[in-house]
Image (spheres, helix red, strand yellow):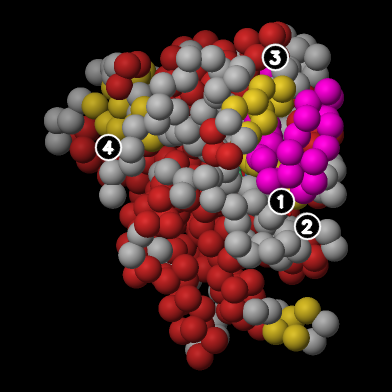
Amino acid sequence: MATAPRPTVTDWSTDFDHTHPDYAASAPQIWDDLRETCPIAHSDRFGGTWLPTRHDDISTISKDPERFSSQGVVVTEFRPDIPAPMGYAPPITSDPPFHSIARGIMLKFFSPKAIEAWEPAVRRTCQELIADIKDRIKAGESEIDAAKAYSQHIPVRVIAEMLDLPNEDGDKFRGFIHNTLEAPGLDEDLPWEETIDFYLDAKVAERRENLGDDLISYLCEADIEGMPLLDEHVRGTIALLIIAGIDTTWSAIGASMWHLAQSPADRSRWIDDPAVRPFAIEEFLRFYAPVTMARLIAADTEFEGCPMKKGEWALLPFPAANRDPEAFERADEFIIDRARNRHTAFGLGIHRCVGSNLARLELRIAIEEWMAAFGDFELADPDTVLWSTGQVRGPRSLPIRFPS
Ligand code: HEM
């Protein structure tokens, strides 16, 4: 279903729209300008939305779940109808005290040790995708869209395997993600059979009948004080993993490749100096942090002089926090060997990313394998790179050329 074009923005401090293509194309510049002129911007769009751009404000809001509820984390015209404390997709939509229970259930699957075990599968996936790309080049293709041929597939395959869902449903997952994050609210108009809830209800029912050793089965068997999780809880958590686990990592991998395609010096440094790689991964995450989450304002409140109203949204642009010169030296420069790098790509406070070990693993291996196969590559045409709109920012089309 086509999305209606967003009304033009004339003033980013009073009418910003994070779902507008102009925001997607130049978000870092917009944050820098706002930080200087209007550090907490407001827009009437989506029923009232605030946009803090300073690290300190983003941090304070993230750590204040009483005033800033996670019941809604994706800005839409609608307000979430599943009440706190559970919300639609626990734990990301849960507030205390339920939040820590829902989060605790997931931690076992995402511990450093559990995630290490996925390294061979991730590497195999990257190598298979690269082998396909090499075949296409051999067959005479001079340009490859690295977002479509590479970065988008890596997290899909991992999540599909973790949940024991068919890899072939990757396009479906990307459609669910688009409806949730890039065209927020669109889901409301979809036929029920095309929604993520319909898809997942069927999978949860199947798994309750026939348990396996995957993450859906694990959630079906989990309990809270002896009571099994509600179907809505299991479904919401899986929806969260599909949405939070795929788009985010795909964006981080794609943005890192976009950077390397334009920086021969950083490509050489990566190849010649393996010790720099762990620093490079953290700097990719800082400089190209893909995720902005939101909070719903729980009651009328004043924050840094701004009169925030109950039911308005507060966006948390973690990427803007990462570029605040008050928080980082030479914040606007990509420094491949940056030593001190306490970036906020994975959020701040109680909702900090559960999947950060997996995200780092996927990003590292994706770049390692790509750089081992294609040390030299460039953007085919910078103007054809397409950045996603909405709360997760990354290249959705990334045409690459390989010098012969
Ligand atoms: C580069 C990739 C990723 C980035 C940048 C990222 C970023 C984030 C951020 C900023 C949050 C905090 C949200 C908030 O404060 O409302 C978050 C939460 C979360 N992320 Fe990630 N994420 C990534 C990958 C993943 C992956 C691969 C998974 C799992 C498969 C995952 C699962 C989660 C979950 C479950 C939460 C909710 C935690 C809670 O509410 O306690 N993420 N992520």
Residue 70: mark in rendering: 1
- Expressed as whole percent of the image width and height from the top left, the position of residue 170 reads 37, 57
Q: Which residue is mark 3?
A: 38
What's the amino acid at mark 4? Lys
- Expressed as whole percent of the image width and height from the top left, the position of residue 356 reads 67, 46
- Please tell me whether residue 134 is drawn above or below residue 116 in the rendered image: above
What's the amino acid at mark 3? Cys
Magenta stretch? 296-323
What's the amino acid at mark 2? Asp
Of labels 1 and 3, the one closer to you: 3
Give the CA distance from mark 3 to mark 4: 48 Å
Give the CA distance from mark 1 to mark 3: 25 Å
Disc 4: CA contacts within 10 A as few (<14), some (14-19) or many (>=20): some
- Expressed as whole percent of the image width and height from the top left, the position of residue 392 reads 53, 38
Residue sitting at 66 percent across and 22 percent down? 41
Mark 3 falls on what kind of element? loop
> Could you tell me if residue 37 is visible in this image?
yes
Q: Nearer the viewer, residue 13 or 165?
A: 13
Give the CA distance from mark 3 to mark 2: 29 Å
Disc 3: CA contacts within 10 A as few (<14), some (14-19) or many (>=20): some
> Could you tell me if residue 345 is visible in this image?
no
Question: Residue lying furthest bottom in this view?
Answer: 209
> Is residue 312 magenta-colored?
yes
- Expressed as whole percent of the image width and height from the top left, the position of residue 76 reads 53, 45
Label whose residue precedes the other's in the sequence (3 or 4)? 3
Mark 4 Cβ inside 8 Å of ligand 1? no
Residue sitting at 33 percent across and 55 percent down? 171
Q: Which residue is mark 2?
A: 95
